Amino acid sequence: MATAYLGLGTNVGNKRGNLVTAAALLAERVGDVLALSDMYETEPWGFESDNTFLNAVIVMTTELSPMELLDATRLIEIEMGRIEKSDGAYHDRIIDIDLLMVDEQILHTERLTLPHPLMHKRSFVMEPLAEVAPSVKHPVFGKTMRELLSEL
């Protein structure tokens, strides 16, 4: 059984409803929810949009491998209506589910890098993550989520 930390984000439609739906689908398909952060309104990161984001972090236990977890989250995104742009650029989205960490695993594959390589640079990830897992240590940097947030 692993503990998975996932970032949720949305900036289209009923944002609060999108996050609640994503959390419910994750609970149904991935494992037990240990914690769900507050929802944070944030500005778009990496692109321009008139729509602000609503972000949260969910902490879960799961029996899925990281790759199975990635596949499960992608399926939820598609079912909720996310459309992937072929250019790979950031854009407005109904839901985005990012695997931030799975226990203390360090993984580098073509499809997945754990921990998420940009998480420590993004306040929209670190604020909700530090809320629900303040003393959990980043497996690469050896700092707690609270410490990483204070460095932003």
Image: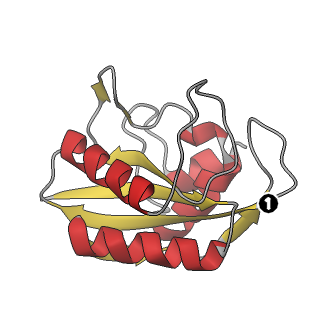
Task: Provide the secondary structure element on which disc 1 rests.
Answer: loop
Query: What sort of colour scheme is used for the picture?
Result: secondary structure
Quarter of the picture containing the C terminus is: top right
Tell me where residue 71 appears, x and y as whole percent: 27, 45
In the figure, is residue 73 to the left or right of 11? left
Position of 129 relative to 111 (above/below):
below
Residue at horizontal 69 percent and vertical 42 percent from the top: 91
- How many numbered tags mark residues here? 1
Task: Tell me if 136 is positioned left or right of 15 in this view.
Answer: left
Q: What residue sits 63% from the left and 61% below the top?
A: 10
In which quadrant is the N terminus drawn? bottom left
Kindly identify the residue that appears in the image at 56 percent across and 68 percent down.
Answer: 131
Residue 6 sits in which quadrant? bottom left
Residue that label 1 marks: 52
Q: Residue at position x 59%, y 53% from top?
A: 125
Question: Compared with residue 52, is residue 102 higher up or lower down, i.e. above or below?
Answer: above
User: In this rendering, does residue 31 appear at all?
Assistant: no
Left/right placement of residue 146 relative to residue 65 reads right
Label 1 Cα neighbours within 10 Å, binned few <14 / some 14-19 / many ≥20? some
Q: Is residue 51 left or right of residue 66?
A: right
| Amino acid type of the residue tagged 1 in the rendering | Thr
Residue 129: x and y, percent?
52, 60
* Residue 59 visible in the picture: yes
Residue 147: x and y in percent read 59, 49
